[in-house]
Image: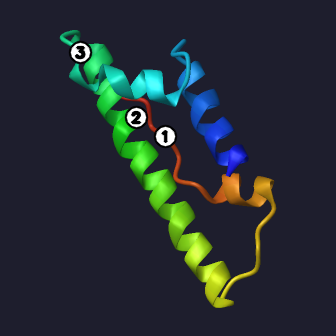
Amino acid sequence: MGAVQKHLDDTARERNYDNIMSLCTYATSQNSRFQAEGQAGVEWRDQVWEYCYQRLDAVMSGSQSVPTAEELVSELPGFPWPS
């Protein structure tokens, strides 16, 4: 799961946030741009981890094989930065 966390953090850094956690803290910002980006980060982070847990369940049940880190990251929902 380290590759997933790195992907989350690297995406947040695209707009100069320290990491995904830092981005998500801006969901309550008084600045409308930061608030929109922070809320989008919260929603995306939830989608990513939900996908990972669904994938884990599929692997544990034997219905899917274990993906490589690169495969897993490539399957994750994309992050559309708010405009």
Residue in the picture at 64% in, 59% down = 75
| Residue 31 located left or right of residue 17 | left
Q: Residue 79, labelled with which disc?
A: 1
Q: Between disc 1 and disc 2, whose residue precedes?
A: 2
What's the distance in space between the residues labelled 1 and 2, CA to CA?
Answer: 8 Å
Circles 1 and 2: CB distance less than 8 Å? yes
Q: Amino acid at mark 1?
A: Phe
Q: Is residue 10 left or right of residue 66?
A: left
Name the residue located 23 percent from the left edge and 15 percent from the top edge: 29
SS assignment at label 3: loop
Q: Position of residue 83 (x, y in %)?
A: 35, 24
Query: Alpha-carbon neighbours of circle 3 within 10 Å: few (<14), some, or many (≥20)?
Result: some
Judged from the image, the secondary structure of the residue bearing numbered disc 1 is loop
Residue 30 vertical placement versus 72 (above, below): above
Q: Tag 2, which secondary structure?
A: helix
Q: How many marks?
A: 3
Q: Residues within 10 Å of mark 2 (few under 14, many from 20)?
A: many
Circle 2 is placed at which residue position? 41
Q: To which residue does mark 3 refer?
A: 29
